[in-house]
Image: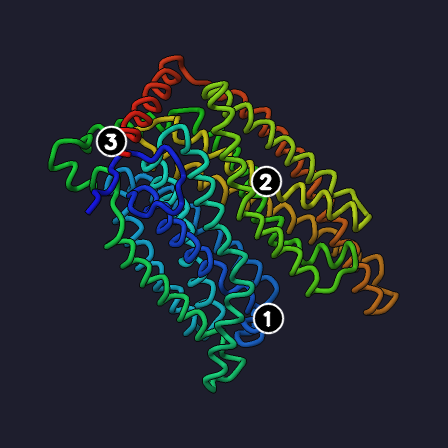
Amino acid sequence: MKEFVSAKATKLELLNLRSIPIRTFWITSIAFFICFFAWFGIVPFMPDVVKDLGLTPTQKWNSIILAVSGTVFARLLIGKLCDKYGPRLCYTYLLILGSIPVILLGFVQTPLQFLICRLFIGFIGASFVITQFHTSIMFAPNIVGTANATSAGWGNLGGGANRLGMPLIAAGVVSFGIADEVAWRYSMVIAGVICFSMGLIYYFFTRDTPEGNFKELKLAGKMPNLKKDEVSFLSTLKDYRVWILFLVYAACFGIELTVYGTMDDYLQNRFGLDRSTAGNLVLSFALMNIFARTLGGYFGDLFGKFRGLRGRVVFLALILATEGLMLSIFSVTTSLVFGMIFLIAFSLTVQMAEGATFSVVPFINKKAIGSISGIVGAGGNVGAFLAAMLLKSKSAVAESAAIAANSELGEQAVKAAQTTAAASAVSSGFFVIGGFIVLAALLSLAIKFATADEMAVIEETEAELILSGVDK
C-alpha cells in the first residue's frame, strides 16, 4: 500500500486524498462550513423567533451584535491555543463545545436566554482561525495563499447555504408531524448535533502537521518549547504589520458581513424589490465565495511568485482600494441595473481582498501563525461591529427626523418617510465606509519584509518542491 505523502503540498490537487495536506484541506473546509452554517443558522427563522419570544427591535439588533462580538474574543484566544496545542485538538474542542449553545438555542424561553445563546454561538466563528492555521502549515509558500483562500471561501458558503439548508431541515421536521411554529427549535438542535459529530471526525481523521501531531513532535524534540512560544507571541503583539492586517481584514471581511447583513432591507427600500428577490440576490453574492476568495489567494501567490512578498502586499492594496471604490459608487447609484453591476463588483473584490489578506498572513511570523491568524481574524469581526454601529446610528437619527417631519400626515406617510430615510442613511453610511476602505488600502502599503524573509521563502519553496518531486 502506498505511503501517505508527508511533505507540505506544493499543489492543490483536490482529488489526491492520500495526501495528508489535501485530506486536511477538505476536512477543515467542511468543518468551517458547518460552523458558519450553525453560526447564522437562526437567521432564516428570525420572524418566527421574534413572534415566539416576543423580541423587540432593539433585542433583535442586540442579538446580531452579540453574535459578532463573541467571535472577536474567541478568535483572539484560539490563535494562541493553536500555536500551543495544535489545530486538531483546538478544532475538536471548538466543535464539541460550540455545539452546546447551538443545541440550547432550541430550548430558550425568554429573550435573555436567546441573547446569551447567540453570544456563545458566536464563539464557533473562531473556526476560521483554525482553518487558516491548519492550511497554512499544510501547504508550501508557492500555493499557501490559494489554499487558505479556497478553504475559507468554501467555509464561508455555510453562512449563505443556511438560507436554503435550514428551511429544508425545518420542512423535514414538519413532515414528521412537528408544528411549523416550533420547527426552528428542532432545526437548531439538529445543527448542533452535526457540529458535535464533526468534532469527532476532526479528532480521528486529521493530523496537526504533515509530519505528525504537536504532542508527538514535542516528545520527539521537533517542536519549540513553551517558553519560545511565549516570546514569539509577545513579538507578535509588538509587530505593527499584524495590526495593519487587523485593520485590513476589518475593511474587507468585516464590511462584507455588515453589508450583506443589511442588504436585504436596503435593496427593498432603495430599489423597491420584494423580500424574496432581495434575499435571492444576497444569497447569490454569498455563493461567489465558491471562486472569488480563491481568486484573491491565487493572485496573491502569483504576485508573490514574480515580485516576492512585496508583490503580495501590492496586490492586497490594489484589490482593497478597488473594493472601497465599488462600495462607494454603489452607494450613490439610484439605477437598479447599475446598482447590481457595482454590487457584484463589490462582492467579487471584497472576497478577493479577504483571500489576498491571508496570502500575506503566513509570512509575517512563521513561529506564531496561529496567534497572527487570530488577531487578524478578530479584526474582521471588529470591523463588522463598528460598521453595524455606524449604520444603526445613522438610521436611527434619519428615522427620528422623518417621524418628526411627517407626524401630522398620518401613519402611512410616516412609515413611507421612515423607509426613505433609512435607505438614505444606509447609503451615506456605505459611502463613508468605502472611503475608510481606501484608506486601509493605502495603509497596507506600509507592510514591509526584510531581505532575509524573502530569501527564506524562496529556500523553503525550493525545498518543498524538491521533496514533493521525490515523493512522487
Mark 3 crowdedness (10 Å alpha carbons): few <14, some 14-19, many ≥20: some
Identify the mark nearer the N-term, 3 or 2. 3
Q: Of the residues tagged 3 and 2, which is closer to the observer?
A: 2
> Which residue is labeled 3 in the image?
229
Q: Position of residue 50 (x, y in %)?
A: 57, 71
Residue for point 61% across, 42% down: 348
Identify the mark nearer the N-term, 1 or 3. 1
**Residue lying furthest right:** 409
> Which residue is labeled 2 in the image?
350
Identify the mark nearer the N-term, 2 or 1. 1
For the residues labelled 3 and 2, the Cα–Cα distance comes to 33 Å
Q: Is residue 354 above or below residue 109?
A: above
Q: Position of residue 41 (x, y in %)?
A: 49, 63
The quadrant in which the C terminus is found is: top left
The three-letter code of the residue at mark 2 reads Val
For this rendering, which residue is in front, 281 or 236?
281
To which quarter of the image does residue 201 belong? bottom left
Residue for point 30% across, 25% down: 466
